[in-house]
Amino acid sequence: MTSIPNFRSLTQLVDKTVVIIGGSSGIGYEVARASLEHGAKVIIASSHAEKVDTAVKNLSALHESFKGRISGSTCNVKVDREIEKFWDSVGQFDHLVYTAIDSVPQFFSETDNGRRAHFDIIFWGALISANYTMQKGYINAGGSITMTMSSSFKKPHKGWEIAASITGAVDGLTRGLAVQLAPIRVNTVSPGYVDTNMWHAMDPTAKVALEDGISKTALVQHVAKPEEIADAYLFCMKCTNLTGVTINVEGGRLLAQPLVDHWLEAKPL
């Protein structure tokens, strides 16, 4: 990447290997794009091979310099051995970004298997990945792990006890792993409402109403796009004095948005 000026803020990720589990869409995809823009080598993974292949193809087409620096693989984060096999195939790397999520976990009335699956994907997949890569010595010196949790831990909607409990566990895991894996840095990004593919399953009228409500009540007065949230992950990778921290990137939801919260409680997604 000799074309990039030798400025520290621009070169910290040059030739670093960034692995993004959950990188085939949404926030993870935008983290992959931003990492490539900063000169990193990127590996994206998800449980759907077709989505991975499409994401790799689309990212490769964005810029000539991205070709040869982006690759993909499948990883079923619900199965411990599959996670280990994935990391054995990756080998040495510098930064892990974990954005894997299946759907928005909500009500305790879900089946037992459904509740456990959410926890497997969001919590256990991240924990097993962190522990296994450290045990194997796969994380290079100066590396980092950045996980993902929703803002429902600090401000849950009525009926969202599953989401709040899982994300609360991730918040605690952030600090625990930061101590356990030091000097490898461990942090978490906590988005609020983000317009990702999961919103596409909503009723169009309900989606418009939600977006309108967020725009009127959010302190930033707009619905977040995935690329905005991706900037927080770049910061976590680049800031070498940051560890054990959950960064809230929720547009001021923790301070405001009473109308949207009330609307969601009346009409859960």
Image: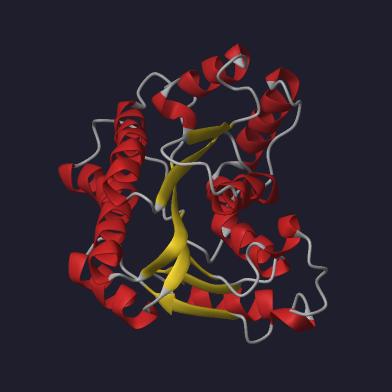
From the viewer's perspective, is residue 40 above or below residue 114?
below
* Position of residue 33 in the picture relative to residue 130 (left or right): right
Q: Nearer the viewer, residue 87 or 140?
A: 140
* Position of residue 70 in the picture relative to residue 130 (left or right): right
- Residue drawn at (31%, 26%), measured in percent from left and top? 161
- Residue drawn at (26%, 46%), measured in percent from left and top? 180
Q: Nearer the viewer, residue 9 or 81?
A: 9
Camera sees residue 97: no
From the viewer's perspective, is residue 82 above or below residue 189?
below
The percent coordinates of residue 225 (x first, y second) are: 69, 45
Instruction: Give the quarter of the image for residue 244.
Output: top left
Instruction: Give the quarter of the image for residue 136.
Output: bottom left
The percent coordinates of residue 94 (x first, y second) are: 47, 66
Q: Nearer the viewer, residue 5 or 199?
A: 5
- Residue drawn at (69%, 22%), measured in percent from left and top? 218
From the viewer's perspective, is residue 108 above or below residue 117?
above
The percent coordinates of residue 169 (x first, y second) are: 29, 35
Q: Residue furthest left?
A: 112
In the picture, the quarter occupied by the N terminus is bottom right
* Position of residue 179 in the picture relative to residue 256 (left or right): left
